[in-house]
Amino acid sequence: MPASAATNTAALGPWDVRNPFVARWLLTIAGLVVLMVIVGGATRLTGSGLSITEWRPVTGAIPPMNAADWLLEFEKYRASPQYQLLNAGMGLEDFKFIYWWEWGHRQLGRFIGLAYLAGLILAAARGWVTTRLGVLLFGMGLVLGLQGAIGWIMVASGLKPGMIAVAPVKLTLHLGFACLFLASLMFVWARIRLARDDDAPGPRGAVIWLWGLIFLQILLGGFVAGSRAGLTYNTWPLMDGAFIPALEKLFVVTPWLENFVDNPTLVQFNHRMVAYLVLIVAVAQAVLLRRKLGRAPVSRRAAALAGVVLVQVLLGIVTLLLSVPLWAGLAHQALAVLILAKATVHLARIA
């Protein structure tokens, strides 16, 4: 780093930056991650995630360029368990449809990685961030790189004999790391760009608990997606005629812990119950903050967050009743990560 840049950086506070580029860059990457989650959801809902059976980080960016290339890729897919057990007889044109979804998902991931790396190098080279913030941003970059490896581990789980989809645990791990990276981007952006609420130190613990519940609910949604639990019990508010399904249906898999991942009944039940809990906690926090602090900024943010959570619960019910059409599934997933981003900003302003 040049001496002048080092001198300038030394004068900065831990969350101060010398150029507005840093905040804009972080927010842009966050927007791309939200888009990535949506594209990933579409890839899953269209059954496209296993169409590319190899992980080639560099050369994989080049799609099939001619008829011979397409036939070669198609032959690789035809050797996969998903084709043999689920899609036997699929034609080349149908294969191209699912291939382009997965290829686009991977290219967007590559673009996000390059955009993040380029922005980090520029900010560090120009001395726009402190050493402390630079180290934090570098660590976040490592998480992003790990996410790419987890993506392949997820795909590889669906290429094992007898599998027609990726393992629910691997899918949830992939989604969870994407959400952690998004949350880190929004937290740092908020600390750089937005003022803190110095008049509201009290609700910090409650906000942390709400954030944790929202993140847990997203993970439970990953298990719902991985086990296709959204395609069962498409009624509300009852499941199989009861608010709480029979115990023998909740725990039918051995060992019993696997029920929390692979049993559609328990997986959907958990997702429903935590959704109610998130809504109750969000509304209670908004009401208590309003009574305690009036129309302070933290109270208004809590009320807005509770309102969006209510919309998400209603959207989840619609998605379930309609048996997860593509538009509803994507909207539900997109709103979930946007709620996480909003809750992260809410937390960052009082942390």
Image (cartoon, helix red, strand yellow):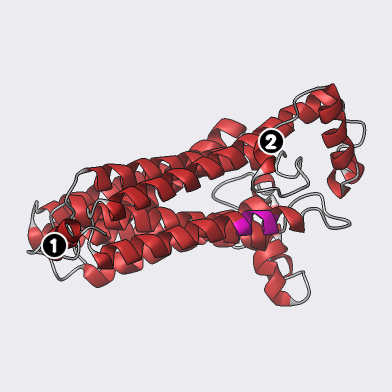
State the residue at coordinates (65%, 38%): 61
Magenta part of the chain? 149-154
- From the top left corner, tell me how far across and down residue 111 is, in percent: 51, 40
How many residues crowd mark 1 within 10 Å: few (<14), some (14–19), many (20+)?
A: few
In the picture shown, does residue 203 fall above or below 36? below
Q: According to the image, label 1 marks what residue?
A: 7
Residue 301 in the image: state x and y as whole percent.
Answer: 21, 50
- Classify the position of the C terminus by image quarter: bottom left
- Quarter of the rendering containing residue 243: bottom right
Residue drawn at x 21%, y 57% as measured from the top left = 191
Q: Is residue 116 or residue 185 the one in the foreground?
A: 116
Q: Nearer the viewer, residue 172 or 186?
A: 186
Q: Which x, y percent locates residue 205? A: 26, 72
| Sequence-first disc among 1 and 2 | 1
Left/right placement of residue 274 relative to residue 69 reads: left
What residue is disc 2 on? 46
